[in-house]
Image (spheres, rainbow, N blue to C red):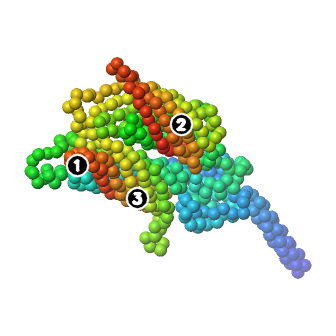
Amino acid sequence: MEIGIRSLFLALLCTALSFSLLAQEEAQQSVIEPSVERRDINEANIDSENFEFGLVVGVISIEDFSSSMVVGARVAYHVNEDFFVEATYGQAEAGETSFEVLSGGAAFLTEEERDYRYYNVSLGYNLNGETFFTDRWVFNSATYLTLGAGSTDFAGDERFTVVLGAGYRLLLTDYFALHINMKDHLFNSELIGEEKTTHNIEYGLGATFFF
Amino acid sequence: MLMSCKQVFLYFSKLGLGIYLTLVFMTSQALADASVQVLITEPYIELYSGPAGGFPVIHVAAKNEWIRVLKRRTNWFKVETNKGVQGWVKQEALHLTQSSAGEAVKLADGSFASYAQRDVEFGALGGSFEGVPAMTVFADWVATENLVAGVSVTQALGDLSENQFFLVSVQHTTFPEWRLSPYVTLGAGKIRTKPRANLVESGDETRTSDLLAAGFGLRYYIAQNIMLKLEYQHLQALTDRDENEDLEQWKLGFAVFF
């Protein structure tokens, strides 16, 4: 009987001790700092994604020369959350003027002169926001405005060109975006006789990567 | 035959799986390598849903929490908390944290202070070259705080001719510490002049000449990573004819720096 009581006390003591040991262990564990890699933070070890590169496909209406498909490339550098600088290149092949179509001969331009190429540099401004496709299906997006200048090589000459643009960028992930954009390329031309300012409106779809 | 096809298929699928696993391992390894953690030392910092101030705040990380810095876009940093919540914090907020070495975090932010330490700048200028519209793109290397070396390409498209020239130039500023700082520039290069297609019959041909340039300008630090430049250049084209050609250019534009 006595042995029974003693063993009971012993058992109780053991349990109590083990509990206190466990508690101690727990206390010790919570004091331990979380395991952190000892890598210091600096510009070099953070991946910065400020450049954007992509391709654009669209339609350009070349004044007096009907509309054609345009293919181009676009590089942008994001300076800060509001501003970016972009350089674009595009090429298309001009169609025929209505005069050429109606007269049935008398071509204004040779095949080579119908190549339409442009490049320009623009400064852009972002209107950042979110696009809600449904209540839970949300993407970051931005509507942007651009103003730039460049050159258009058409009909054997390069012409100084001012470009006004507006676009919409939908970021499917942090580094992949879809674009819809519209641009007006303005340059002076005397191809149809007297000199005038032509408006060549382009709209396109693009896909870009940030890197 | 059927057996061997199966074997080949198996072999390729195993190979594919192997490559896939290796890639996954490598990328996860690379990601693990890239992970940098910082400790929040202020009461809290706010996580935004996107890399701009206009996006909503979606989470608040509290003091003594470690956050992983994943990537950077302009002056915003994508971070992940211990609980796996991802969001963007602005640079000022990241500067309220401590690195794993126990030091306050401080990174280049495009401010006027980091403008003084820039290495490279590039930009575009538009203006007038002998009365016709001209466009210049340039890239500069900031050698010392007073000296900048650079290359530029200009295209001037007039009614009678197209001019293209490049210059290798040196810029000097006496007062690099001023926000609005004047500078002088000297350069040398080549110019190509091509008559308009409708004037080819006039007998002019495309010609290339050496070019010397001297100029002065003003640069102004305007905001985060951007500066404005206004420049006047006097150019001399060393032609084959009896007289050299004196040319003038005005230009205004912007530059970004790193």
Q: CA distance from mark 1 to mark 3?
A: 24 Å
Q: Quadrant of residue B194?
A: top left
Estimate the spatial distance between the alpha carbons at disc 2 and disc 3, rounded to whole Å.
Answer: 34 Å
Instruction: Please give the chain letter of the residue carrying mark 3.
Output: A
Q: Nearer the viewer, residue B151 or A76?
A: B151
Q: Are marks 1 and 2 on the same chain?
A: no
Residue B257 is situated, as x and y percent measured from the top left of the image, at: 55, 43
* Three-letter residue code for mark 1: Ala
Residue depicted at x 46% and y 38%: B250
**Quadrant (top left, top right, bottom left, bottom right) of the C terminus of chain B:** top right
- In primary-sequence order, the first of circles 1 and 3 is 1
Q: Which residue is situated farthest in the bottom direction here?
A: A1
Q: Which label belongs to residue A167?
A: 3
CA gap, disc 1 and disc 2: 41 Å
Tell me residue A131's x, y (percent).
Answer: 46, 67
Residues under numbered marks 1 and 2 in contact, where contact means CB atoms less than 8 Å apart = no
Q: Residue sitting at 47 percent across and 33 percent down?
A: B233
Point out the residue furthest to the left here. A104
| Residue toward you, B73 or B237 | B237
Asked which quadrant contains residue A134, the reply is bottom left
Identify whether B1 is placed above or below B165: below
Q: Secondary structure at mark 3?
A: strand
At numbered mark 2, what does the secondary structure look like: helix, strand or loop?
Answer: strand
Tell me whether circle 1 and circle 3 mark residues in contact (CB < 8 Å): no
Q: Please indicate, yes or no, whether residue A159 appears anywhere in the rendered image.
A: yes
Is the residue marked by circle 1 packed among few (<14), some (14-19), or many (20+) residues within 10 Å? many
> Would you say B3 lies left or right of B215 here?
left
Callouts 2 and 3 close, C-beta under 8 Å = no
> Where's residue B55, x and y in %?
55, 64
Determine which residue is flagged by label 2: B217
Dot 3 amino acid type: Gly
Residue with the mark numbered 1: A94
